[in-house]
Every structure is written in C-alpha cells, then in structure tokens.
Amino acid sequence: MTLHHGALALGILVGIAAQLLLKQGAMGGGNLIAQFLNPYTIGGLALYGIAAFFYVVALRAIPVSVAFPSVALSYVLVALLGNLWFGEPLGVAHLAGILLIVVGVGLLHAV
C-alpha cells in the first residue's frame, strides 16, 4: 500500500467518524442553531475538514475515477455502524445495496 492509498483509507475512516458525530449532534434536539453549536456537530465538521486533507493527498497519485468511488465504502461502514450504535434499520434491500457498493469498488481497484 502506498502513502496515497493510506491517505485515502484514512480520509474514508475520518469521514466515517465525522458522519457519526454529525448524527449524534443532530440527535441533541433543539433548534437548528443549537444543533450547529453542539460539540458533536462542531467535531464532525472539523473531522470532515481533516478527511478532505487526506483525500487531497490521495488524489495526488490516485485517479479521481478510482478515489471518489472508493469513498463509497464509507456508506457501507456508516450503514453498519448506524445500525449498531443508533438502531437504524438494516434490511435486505440495505444489505443488497451494500453488497453492490463493495463489488463495484472492488472492480474499480482490480482494473
């Protein structure tokens, strides 16, 4: 694995953490201003900035036609973690979609 692939993986993982923090912040209640001032929301937005940094490093050597679809792997992990941590539904249709994402990203990296 190259530095750039490592940066892409880190960008994806940090983006996942950001999404989960944003979800936690959104569950805090209150009006929209209160949600944006929630520490979880602020932390999630900050992590998205860090994820973008890693993504830019990855793009220095990985074609965007491969890097950007790879970010779709975050959908898989966010869906699974959303189910585990927030009790969000994960039915057969969700699992089928997740499988298609994994197969699609795998095909892109196999080329």
Image (spheres, helix red, strand yellow):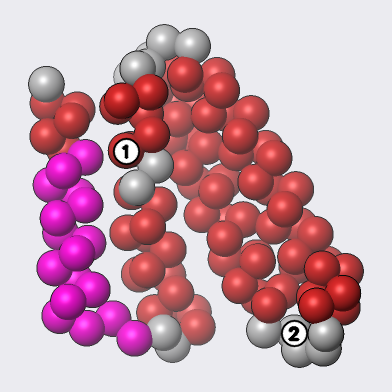
Look at the picture and state if 29 lies above or below 3. Answer: below
Residue visible at 47% across and 21% down in the picture: 58
Mark 2 burial class by Cα count in 10 Å: few <14, some 14-19, many 20+:
some
Amino acid residing under circle 1 = Pro
Give the residue furthest to the front: 32
Give the residue furthest to the top: 61
Amino acid residing under circle 2 = Gly
Magenta-drawn stretch, dominant element (helix, strand or loop): helix
Residue 99's spot in the image, x, y percent?
A: 15, 59
Q: Count up the numbered dots.
A: 2
* Local secondary structure at mark 2: loop
Question: Looking at the image, can residue 67 be seen?
Answer: yes
- In the image, residue 18 lies in the stretch drawn in magenta: no
Residue visible at 12% across and 26% down in the picture: 110
Q: Nearer the viewer, residue 75 or 64?
A: 64
Residue 64's spot in the image, x, y percent?
A: 38, 23
